[in-house]
Amino acid sequence: MRYMATYDFMETMRNTNQWLGATATAMASSPAMALFPNPAIQWMAAWGEVTERSFQRMIVKPDWHIDSFTCEDGKDHIVNVNTVVERPFGDLIHFDVSGRKPMDRKVLLVAPMSGHYATLLRSTVKSLIPDCEVYITDWHNARDIPVSEGKFDIEDYTLYLVDFMKELGADTHVIAVCQPAPLTLAATAYLAEEDPKAQPLSLTLIGGPIDPNAAATDVTDFGHRVTMGQLEETMIQRVGFKYPGVGRMVYPGLLQLYSFMSMNADRHSKAFSDQIMRVAQGEASEHDAHNRFYDEYLAVMDMTAEFYLTTVERIFKKGEIAKNEFVVAGRKVDIGKITTVAVKTVEGAKDDITAPGQCIAALDLCTGLPDNKKASHVEPGAGHYGIFAGKSWRNNIRPLVLEFIDANSPKPKRKAANKNAA
């Protein structure tokens, strides 16, 4: 499958389905159809509307949609999304609330690069802005990065995190969500040896596969079941002529989306059939629950082939982080060298992506860290998404994380966390 033709074929199929949806809507909305009153015509229009929207948003990077924030003065302040560090494969950005004094808490959110854009953490960002200066890693779509920029694997990713932490300084608190948790732990250990003064104050790891073998899931089973040769042959394609990254080997976003949705095919099928009926009956709206979720979920990005393959091979198959054998730029990273950075793990009791046990393994690896610098939390009834963006995050986990940040800051915070944050 490592050809431009297969990549372009997938894009052609996506574009065709988008066109079919638009055509169905146009036909069913024609005034001539009023001559043939039939519920099937309303259904066809609804099917077309949902289909066109679904396939169109697969290639569009979502906007942050964080325009303003009401501060203590009762006024709405503009939120500017500023680029702090600009790099070929990802930027460090800051959500700057105009006219607001800098907050005591400085937080770096490390977003996953696992098929979705950093905007997947939009609700997480919005919930932290009232109480923190929020920074986030904004990873780029590999199809838009010219081949001349070179490779980007998990070692490069780790070094990007090292640079971002150095840029923000030692008064930073890092929160890594899902996929980047093991690499963020490695980046912190790398700093512990290279530049100890640049280490963050605390590190919170949320639902990350530190030790994938600690608790089996469909994801870990897949990682062990397939060979690297099979993955390279069936998952990797070459970007077509339409994009700036023409010729780059990638794991395509559309292929990732198929994998995501096939894991819960029945649930997704029902969600779309129900939405079509709601549209047909006039009960749907532009920003209803279905559209809010799928506008983000269906927006996918390509990963570089080397990042995807090294993640599977070194994190899941060989377990280099779990065995404390990870090497970056020829240097073995010893997680036991972390001695001052407080580490907290957060897991969801019903997480079927990163099951409980996988993330808390980080605490055992931090052999040089005293027990009073370690913490863990398992959220009852929470799935993977809920521990960083759902009600479980807003109502239970977020306050605990802010308390952990405050407890590991050089001076106590005078102001309590805003419990009414979005």
Image: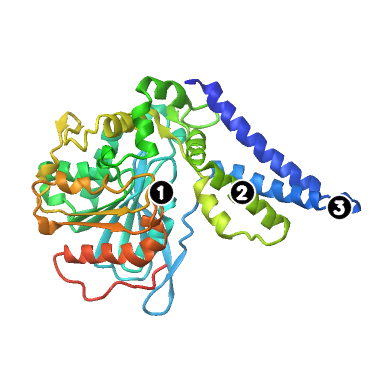
Q: Which residue is mark 3?
A: 31
Name the image quarter holding residue 90.
top left
**Front-lying residue, 91 or 256:** 256
Q: Position of residue 37 (x, y in %)?
A: 87, 54
In the image shown, does 270 or 138 lie closer to the viewer? 270
Amino acid residing under circle 3: Pro
Q: Quadrant of the C terminus?
A: bottom left
Q: Earlier in the sequence, mark 2 or mark 1?
A: 1
Task: Characterize the local packing of mark 2: few (<14), some (14-19) or many (20 or more) Cα atoms within 10 angstroms.
Answer: some
Element carrying mark 3: helix
Q: Is residue 57 left or right of residue 104?
A: right
Task: Report the residue marked by disc 2.
Answer: 272
Q: Secondary structure at mark 2?
A: helix
Left or right of 50 in this view: 10 = left
* Res. 278 image quadrant: bottom right
**Secondary structure of the residue carrying numbered label 1:** helix
- Residue at coordinates 43% horizontally, 51% vertically from top-left? 120
Residue at point 63%, 47% (across, down): 53
Q: What label does residue 301 carry, if any?
A: none
Q: Amino acid at mark 1?
A: Ala
In front: label 2 or label 1: 2
Residue in the foreground of this view, choosing between 61 and 112: 112
The residue at which mark 1 appears reads as 118
Residue ranking furthest to the right: 35
